[in-house]
């Protein structure tokens, strides 16, 4: 067999070609695809991680024949005697299990996804709750014909603009509940003070004591995020400074931003506000905040960098938002 001898230049060339091929192969296998904006519902993993911090559903029992009061985290539900029926209208007289979850703060809103928007703008919350009733076989109960119940928000302050809002659960959206106002007004509370609401004729699953901001003009707000922070892995919130009101700023695929343009609501021009952006990239968490002294017309916010944190750190940041 003929021996093949390579000179040093030939050896270097072969080594270089081998290195290039190996490096290219590694890049294809190891490099992650860039995270791009997606057109459609995109609920990021960070929201699922934060759900563990949402207020708990607490259980209480009462006798349907005598009625009674259940109080959870400063909100009381008062039911008269014989107030419950099965969904087919049959009166129910046994033990009733009431489950209640209360949403009293901005952090409660962001952890649960039950935020405060209605009819195209943010609303000011004096307390939200999720409530349902079950019989002793875990069947859903409703209010019996002609019966009403009352709610008392013990930590609220009476305001002439307060109304009962009812909520409908939605899917494929960061905002878990969309709210609609009723004509049911508040009164001075009796159980521990606060604000009471009477004559609620349906056992709505989501209830909210709210006020409209009643300020104009309304405008939009948009937030740009750094490259790689998209609606796939990132969420954006806003709140009015000093108000118990917060909501997600929805993602806008065409703008490649988080923006209220074409979204669920607009914001009050001239109001002070805060922006919070959070993300989960791989197994790491990031955040950034922005204070707005006064919201301008079609206000634009640009986030240039994100700060690394932990899930526990993110919880603290949201609690102080």
Image: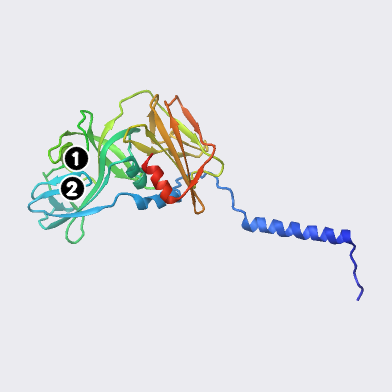
Q: Is residue 181 visible?
A: yes
**What residue is shown with label 2?**
71
User: At x 87% / y 60%, what residue is drawn?
Assistant: 10
Instruction: Name, please, the residue furthest toward the bottom.
Output: 1
Q: Is residue 174 visible?
A: no
> Where in the figure is residue 282, as x and y percent of width and height?
52, 53
Where is 23 relative to 316, above or below?
A: below
Q: Residue 244: which quarter of the image?
A: top left
Q: Quadrant of the N terminus?
A: bottom right
Point out the tag, 2 or 1, that comes first from the N-terminus: 2
As rendered, which of 317 and 269 lies closer to the eye?
317
User: At x 58% / y 48%, what residue is drawn?
Assistant: 34
> Where in the figure is residue 220, as x and y percent of width and height?
43, 29
Where is 267 relative to 319, above or below?
A: above
Q: Residue 136: which quarter of the image?
A: bottom left
Numbered tag placed on residue 29 in the rendering: none
> Where in the figure is residue 117, as x and y percent of width and height?
34, 36
Q: Is residue 82 left or right of residue 100?
A: left
Q: Are marks 2 and 1 in contact (CB under 8 Å)?
A: yes
How far separated are the C-alphas under marks 2 and 1?
10 Å
Callout 1 secondary element? loop
**What residue is shown with label 1?**
154
Callout 2 secondary element? strand
Q: Residue 4: which quarter of the image?
A: bottom right
> Where in the figure is residue 148, as x and y percent of width and height?
13, 43
Q: Residues within 10 Å of mark 2 (few under 14, many from 20)?
A: some
Q: Is residue 227 left or right of residue 46?
A: right
């Amino acid at each position: 067999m003929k021996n093949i001898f390579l000179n040093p230049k030939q050896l270097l060339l072969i080594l270089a070609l081998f290195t290039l091929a190996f490096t290219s192969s590694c890049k294809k296998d190891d490099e992650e695809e860039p995270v791009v904006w997606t057109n459609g519902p995109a609920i990021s993993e960070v929201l699922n991680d934060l759900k563990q911090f949402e207020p708990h559903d607490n259980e209480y029992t009462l006798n349907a024949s005598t009625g009674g009061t259940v109080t959870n985290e400063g909100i009381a539900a008062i039911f008269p005697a014989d107030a419950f029926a099965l969904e087919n209208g049959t009166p129910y007289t046994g033990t009733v299990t009431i489950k209640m979850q209360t949403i009293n703060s901005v952090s409660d809103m962001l952890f649960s996804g039950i935020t405060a928007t209605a009819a195209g703008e943010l609303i000011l919350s004096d307390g939200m709750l999720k409530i349902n009733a079950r019989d002793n076989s875990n069947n859903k109960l409703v209010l019996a014909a002609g019966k009403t119940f009352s709610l008392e928000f013990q930590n609220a302050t009476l305001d002439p603009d307060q109304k009962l809002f009812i909520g409908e659960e939605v899917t494929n959206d960061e905002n878990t509940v969309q709210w609609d106002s009723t004509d049911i007004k508040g009164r001075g509370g009796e159980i521990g003070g606060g604000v009471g609401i009477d004559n609620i004729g349906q056992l709505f699953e989501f209830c909210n004591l709210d006020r409209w901001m009643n300020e104009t003009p309304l405008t939009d707000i948009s937030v740009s995020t750094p490259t790689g922070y998209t609606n796939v892995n990132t969420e954006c919130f806003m709140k009015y400074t000093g108000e118990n009101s917060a909501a997600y700023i929805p993602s806008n695929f065409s703008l490649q931003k988080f923006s209220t343009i074409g979204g669920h609501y607009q914001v009050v021009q001239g109001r002070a506000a805060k922006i919070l952006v959070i993300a989960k990239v791989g197994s790491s968490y990031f955040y950034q905040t922005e204070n707005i002294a006064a919201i301008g017309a079609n206000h634009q916010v640009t986030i240039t960098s994100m700060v690394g944190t932990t899930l526990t750190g993110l919880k603290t940041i949201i609690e102080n938002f």
